[in-house]
Amino acid sequence: MNNIKTTKLFLALINACMDLLSPVSCPVCKKNLLKFPCPICPACKTALLESKIPPAVTTAYMSKIWSCFFYENIAKNCIHQFKYRQKPNMTAIFQLNIQHLLLTITPLLKNIDIIIPVPLHKTRKHFRGFNQTELIAKILSKNLSIPIKPNILIKTKKTMPQVNLPRQERIINLKNCFCVQNSRIIHGKNILIVDDVTTTGTTLNICAKELITRGAKEIFGFTLAKTR
Ligand SMILES: [Zn+2]
């Protein structure tokens, strides 16, 4: 058994043990979840849904980046469960916030041709078992009736997590790590790129630059969370 499989199995075992110790408690507030067939309790769900929507931002290569909530408090905890505790069912909660944001921005997305999730390196995707940005992209695709093209942009290098790096190092960290396959499909297209969390927009901007260089027309971004 290789190292990744062993570590993955070990993590799954630890997660299963933690779930057994607190069988059905809300991962955010620890309240008993017995009566609620939901990843988090109704109070946390309501609080998340009432989170302030951050203002949209632009970057050099992106016309607009929208986010559902700030990366703090309940939202940060939920995203941590989603990504690092391997809980893809958190999308049932995020879907409500996504639909809430879409109520106001759907008219602005009417010219989008395709949705592209920010890719994970294949090793990390294998380790996590899913790419969280693909799951977010699926919700958007379903609500907007716009197709997802997950195999256009690929990540060819393993990189350090961006979250703790200063801005300049974020750019160096991601240098030459994304590439476009089948550029014919993106030629002249307006694209919505999807990520989980954005801080300075560096990852989205680098993906956008790659897509525009290969012929895409205009790039927009959508993320669950944005750091303040
Ligand atoms: Zn709760």
Image (tube, helix red, strand yellow):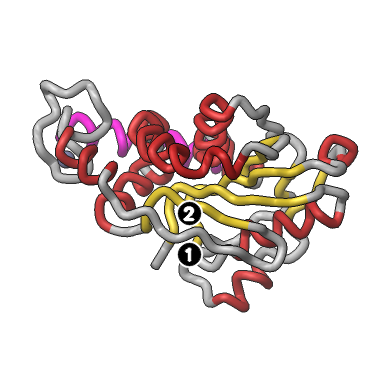
Q: Main secondary structure of the magenta part?
A: helix
Q: Amino acid at mark 1?
A: Val
Residue displayed at 43% across by 34% down = 9
88 or 205: which is nearer to us?
Answer: 205
Can you give x and y, in whole percent of width and height, for residue 166 in the image?
53, 77
Quick check: 227 left or right of 29? right
| Segment tinted magenta in the rendering | 2-22
Position above or below: 141 against 68? above
Residue hosting label 1: 163
Residue hosting label 2: 197
Q: Residue furthest front?
A: 107
The response on whether ligand 1 sits within 8 Å of label 2 is no
Residue displayed at 37% across by 47% down = 79
Residue displayed at 84% across by 35% down = 185
Can you give x and y, in whole percent of width and height, for residue 174 in the image?
67, 63
191 or 90: which is nearer to us?
Answer: 191
Do residues under tags 2 and 1 come within 8 Å of each other at their CB atoms? yes
Q: Residues within 10 Å of mark 1 (few under 14, many from 20)?
A: few
Q: Quadrant of residue 21?
A: top left
Where the N terminus falls, by quadrant? top right
